[in-house]
Amino acid sequence: MKNSWKLFLSFLLVGVLSAAVGAGTYFYLNNKQIANGTGDQVFNQAGFRNVNYATPAENTDFTFAAEQTIHAVVHIKSVAKTSSRGQQYMDPWDFFFGITPQYRSQPRVGFGSGVIISNDGYIVTNNHVIEGADEIEVTMNDDKILKAKLIGNDAESDLALLKIEGTDFSFVPFGDSDRLKIGEWVLAVGNPFNLTSTVTAGIVSAKGRGNIFTGYGGRGSQAQNRIESYIQTDAAVNPGNSGGALVNTKGELVGINTAIYSETGNYIGYSFAIPMSIVKKVVSDIRQYGTIQRAMLGVTINELPYLKEREPDIYKKLQVSDGVYINGFSTNSSAKASGIQVGDVITAIDGVKIKNFSELRAQISRYNPGNKVKVQVQRGSGVKVYEVELKNDQGNTEIIKEMKPFDVLGASFKDISDDQKEKWGIDFGIEVTDIKNGKLKEIRIVKGSIILTANKIRVSSVDEFEKIVQSILKQSADDRGLFIRVLNPNGKIGYYAVDLND
């Protein structure tokens, strides 16, 4: 019995001594690290502070930025009048009183936000806010309502420039979106759900976001039709915020709020804004030239993730993981003329690294046709740099002027009369009243012909036809095709394809 107790006490003593030695060693080493300041340098984290020593974030007072912005952010109401493409309804009173049903188109009304960018009333907003609108109405922060004129719009960047009459308007000064940092505080100012002058705050979550809604895609012109290099934030943005301001804590405009990523249609944590590096170029071109001076490298591309998934044999031979793979060239390609080859991977433009097509497109969109840029490519295991003179989509460096739809067609039109409707048994179409040199003369359309449809859309008025042609002219060169169905003066129906490129 005595031996058992001695054994038990021996184990107990050893355990107590071990615990004491372990605790003493821990406190000694811990105190030594704190005294020497090396505890956070084990992983080369010099200057790292434990959370209890963290200092409050600076510039978290948003009142100045909000006060500088809210009077320059406006509510926009866009109205698309009666159209054969609109939603139709039948007046129920006609039915009850035995009157032949008359179908009427309901006007389409949209709402959004806009930002005044000059004291003489220029406003930038999203193209999708005013697209197809016949009337645009602006409500100021003081509830004053003004009519706005559309100066120009661009579907590829989803931007539009409006003008209201007046002077001494409050406006938001331009900021530098390139200098935005991940984690920097920003404010979103707009009119969600028609609630005017709403300000929300968040941080910059990411920059250069592209292919948000379509995936990384692959090849061809469709992937290259849209400029996407968004600023991603966690500032709350909802329907009605489109076209509103994204500002930094200085009250400077750094982006135009454009989209949210949501499965419900409302904000769930992600919002996206067009950076000012793109906005300034687009609105300046619209004001100065009436249309965008868009520069082109003249290449067709594959994203590297696409190659990795679909063409792994090609991907395995590449020596880089970031960049844009060239799989072909357009006609009169300036990139090809400079010496760039199929199979090269573009990795930088003027020293700015390129990870994907969105970044390439955003970087090239800063330049005008005629500008020269240095394009860095990876070819095999080597790096080469080429100087490329950028061209427009017509393959030259000339200034592109705004193309007026009927000037391009070389014709005049008028709505058809009731007598013509009765004669031909139709209730839509427009008459060609004059033919000059232009696209319609080239395909032998004659005076007195009636255009019935354009790109499978019934044409009910001259204004409607003008909008259809104008929308086609704003597309990329590969997509500027007009297909019309025509009732000729001899009563025969003809189908014609019109190339709207110069």
Image (cartoon, helix red, strand yellow):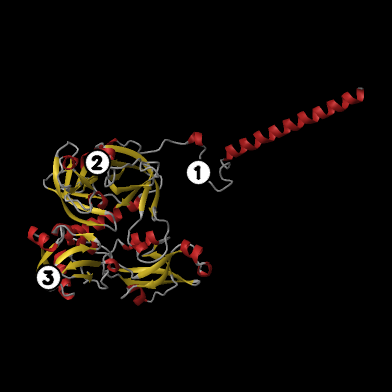
Give the side of residue 107 with respect to residue 200, left or right: left
Q: Which residue is mark 1?
A: 47
Numbered badge on residue 17: none
The nearer-to-camera label among 3 and 2 is 3
Q: Amino acid at mark 3?
A: Pro
The nearer-to-camera label among 2 and 1 is 2
x 89%, y 25%: residue: 4
Q: Which residue is mark 3?
A: 489
Task: Write down the quadrant of residue 436 in the picture.
Answer: bottom left
- Is there any visible trace of residue 38 in the rendered image? yes
- Is there any visible trace of residue 65 in the rendered image? no
Q: Residue furthest top?
A: 1
The nearer-to-camera label among 3 and 1 is 3
Numbered badge on residue 69: 2
Q: Secondary structure at mark 2?
A: helix
Q: Secondary structure at mark 1?
A: loop
Q: Amino acid at mark 2?
A: Thr
Above-or-below relation of 327 to 69:
below
How far is the residue under mark 2 from the one under mark 1?
37 Å
- The quadrant of the image that shows the C terminus is bottom left
Where residue 160 sits in the image (x, y, percent)? 23, 53
Above-or-below relation of 196 to 388:
above
